[in-house]
Amino acid sequence: MNIPDELFYTESHEWIRIDGDKGYIGISDYAQHNLGDIVFVELPDIDIEVNAGDQFAVIESVKAVSDVYSPLSGTIIEVNENLEGSPELLNEDPYENYIAVVAFTDISEKEKLMSAEQYEAFCIEEDKK
């Protein structure tokens, strides 16, 4: 399982890469592996406001339909339009293929997210269930 150290993670298996005052959001390798072949991604609208924990996108795979939640509060300023025609990019490289970019409003919310080490331990516990 690939878990890059420079990212932050949620219990619902999203990651966020912080770059200045914006964050790139995607799903983890653990999530894409458990979803199976991804066949559709419903991207959010640009300029919508989201709070940390809000659902903002939907991923459909051959196994399930899953909501994607924002790790931080802010405004969606960009989406990865490549996913509309090629949703399988999330299976191929979930860390290079972000879903959306949020201009966040409260960086202190980052304290509630998991480090790579914490996320790895969380995933090991998830697999035991």
Image (cartoon, rainbow, N blue to C red):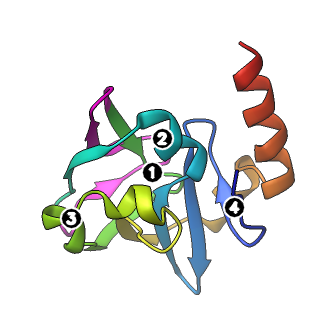
Of the two numbered discs 1 and 4 on the same chain, state the one appearing first in sequence: 1
Please, what secondary structure does the residue beneath circle 2 have?
Answer: loop
Of the two numbered discs 2 and 1 on the same chain, state the one appearing first in sequence: 2
Residue 90 quadrant: bottom left
Of the two numbered discs 3 and 1 on the same chain, state the one appearing first in sequence: 1
Please state which of the two labelled residues, at mark 4 or mark 3, is closer to the viewer.
3
| Amino acid type shown at disc 1 | Ser
The residue carrying mark 3 is 86
Q: Position of residue 111 (x, y in %)?
A: 76, 55
Picture disc at residue 70: 1
The residue carrying mark 2 is 53
The residue carrying mark 4 is 108
- The reply to whether the C-beta atoms of the residues labelled 2 and 1 are less than 8 Å apart is yes
| Amino acid type shown at disc 2 | Gly
Q: Give the Cα separation between the discs numbered 2 and 1.
A: 5 Å
Please, what secondary structure does the residue beneath circle 3 have?
Answer: loop
